[in-house]
Amino acid sequence: MKQWYEELFENYSRKYDDEIFTRGTLGECDFIEQEAGYNKSIRILDIGCGTGRHTIELARRGYTIIGVDLSESQLARAREKAKEQNVAVDFQKHDARNLPFDREFDLAIMLCEGGFPLMETDEMNFQILESASRALREKGKLIFTTLNGLFPLFHSVKDFITHAGDSLSEDTQRFNPSVKEFQPTLSFDLMTFRDYNLTVFTDDDGNRKELACNERYYVPSEINWLLKSLNFCKIDIFGAKLGAFSRNDKLSTEDFEMLIVAEK
């Protein structure tokens, strides 16, 4: 049986590139370059690369990068875009929970919930972090975004459930297959920090679909603990603003996502 995230992305590659959250690619890649020290000799792994927006842009800027994703449809679109832009990128189909890389990369990126935290169990989400850690060399760096558990807590679960569909800012409407179709959250479980919601969208062939989704929200202390258990020595957590990642952006209760930079 396919999971909701597999169904969502099996025929949604062209629509994906029209989403609001894809508009911040250039600014996000500027931040990645800064974190890489503008060192073009490093090897980068893009986990959950989707249609390759960060992968292609970083390759265009001269970096050696491999993009991996679970969706063949997303990868096909990524390869098509790379060819159109005359950019050479190696795109590979892999499950982020079991990547075939062992200490091969200096930097791994995992942006816009490309895998973590979409998995159906906490153990599976941890496997993604574990797999990313294993792919990194000594002193490697991991940059990723995830859902900020402080957001629903601060705004109260009641308000979050009531207004999730119509009060979020542009950079929070990540899964936004037409904002008009986006459905409010059905249930936020305080015991598991999982948001159960109904996402209604139209695929690339014009078919209207409904998917029962669930995503895991994390609080900063959880992220710290998970990464420290994987031997990351330095962990910094910031707010994640669309197209404007910055170390000056202190994480707040208004940030729907958080940006994590972890170093081995």
Image (tube, rainbow, N blue to C red):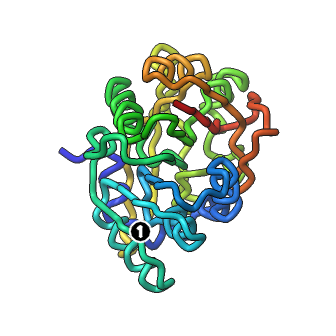
In the picture, residue 29 is in which quadrant? bottom right
**Which residue is rendered at x = 40% and y = 60% of the image?**
66
In the picture, residue 25 is in which quadrant? bottom right
What residue sits right under mark 1 in the picture? 13
Q: Residue 220, percent across and down? A: 62, 22
Q: How crowded is mark 1: few (under 14 residues within 10 Å), some or many (20 or more)?
A: many
Farthest residue, direction top: 191
Query: In this rendering, is residue 210 above or below 102?
Result: below
Query: In this rendering, is residue 236 above or below 72?
Result: above
Give 139 or 123, whichever is nearer the viewer: 139
**Which residue is rendered at x = 81% and y = 39% of the image?**
248
Q: Which amino acid does label 1 sit on?
A: Ser
Is the N terminus in the top left, top right, bottom left or bottom right quadrant?
Answer: top left
Q: Residue 154, percent across and down? A: 72, 22
**Which residue is rendered at x = 48% and y = 46% of the image?**
106
Q: Residue 22, percent across and down? A: 59, 62
- The answer to whether residue 120 is left or right of residue 175 is left
Q: How many marks?
A: 1
Give 250 or 42, whichever is nearer the viewer: 42
Query: In this rendering, is residue 122 above or below 4?
Result: above
Farthest residue, direction right: 248
**Which residue is rendered at x = 25% and y = 46% of the image?**
100
Q: Residue 12, percent across and down? A: 40, 66
Q: Is mark 1 on a helix, strand or loop?
A: helix
